Amino acid sequence: MFAARTALRSLTLNGARRYSSATPASKSSSNLPFYLLGAGVAAAGGYYYVNFSEKAKPVVQQLKSPLDPENFVDFKLKRVEPYNDNTAKFVFELPNNEASLLPVASCLVVKSSDPNALVNDQGKPIIRPYTPISPPDLPGELTLMVKKYDTGNASKYIHSLKEGDSLAIKGPIPKWPYKINEFDEVALIGGGSGVTPLYQILTHALADKSNKTKFTLLFGNIAEKDILLREEFDALKKQFPDKFDVVYFLDKPEANWKGAKGFIGKDALTNYVAPPTLGEKVKVFVCGPPGQVAALAGKKAGMKQGELGGILKELGYTEDQVYKF
């Protein structure tokens, strides 16, 4: 059900254009098998695709990703998998059964393949970032989980796509170069569809048999139906009880809800997140609506991180310990 990744060779980032909120890569090499090289995405060697419960099985050797970090490329929509009343998984076909080779953690930006179909008031293309939820080494498919917002022109446009339509995609855009066992404790704090980059990190790390890091996900939503990827998170918790825990918070729970209620606040952070006294051994990743991010970690400065603020700063965490997607 979940894909495991085994790196054949670590590559370093060389001259790739980054999203402005990206954190510079560490001097130590990442365990990621693939990074951007020049204008393309290349891999030295090949890749593996396996299930968590299986041994690694070599698949085809692939030297370059079908994605392009410098140019938009049209990808055909293979199928749509409805998730709830306002969210669906959009599965795009990758040519020649290739894998995306997406670095962890990174995102993509999308726009309409039709230059006139999705534009702003000035007639310029509307471009939005999304984090795929499909494994980087999954052959032939790239999956975006998209929540439709009433005021979201891009999300409404994507939800209007039919099988066989195409979407223009550019990337990868590296965000945080995650390295296995860099931290003892990692807290993932998310809200709504902002959980996707946290899911990307979590599945990547837990798939590695050498992982020793303990992950805790605090996931806030309005109602129970809004909990995206819940089955996946619950399955990971069952499979890795010593390495992963998840706590769901609902703003407006129904009477039979037995989980946490209300917003993710100071008490929740104190109870579930490793203390800042662990220093460089603890990391907190935050991704969600702007209001939630600001309350927990301070506002982002556009695409940049911005100063640390909010509850995490009050509790003594430092900018080095917190990353805002």
Image (spheres, rainbow, N blue to C red):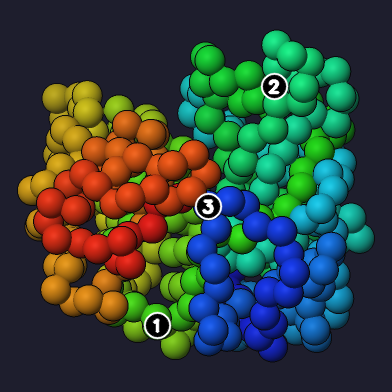
Which is more foreground, mark 3 or mark 1?
A: 3
Q: Nearer the viewer, residue 305 or 202?
A: 305
CB contact under 8 Å: marks 2 and 1: no
Q: Residue 20, relative to residue 181: is it above or below?
A: above
CB contact under 8 Å: marks 3 and 2: no
In terms of sequence position, does the residue under pointer 2 or pointer 1 come before the other? 2
Q: Position of residue 35 (x, y in %)?
A: 70, 72
Q: Amino acid at mark 2?
A: Tyr
Seen as rendered, the residue at the extreme right is: 96
Mark 3, secondary structure of its residue = loop
Mark 2, secondary structure of its residue = helix
Q: Residue 269, relative to residue 209: is it above or below?
A: above
Q: Amino acid at mark 3?
A: Ser
Q: Is residue 94 left or right of residue 193?
A: right
Badge 1 is on which residue? 181
Mark 1, secondary structure of its residue = loop
Badge 3 is on which residue? 21
Marks 3/1: CA distance?
23 Å
Q: Residue 292, relative to residue 33: is it above or below?
A: above
Q: Is residue 227 left or right of residue 177?
A: left
Q: Position of residue 255 (x, y in %)?
A: 14, 25
Seen as rendered, the residue at the extreme top is: 121
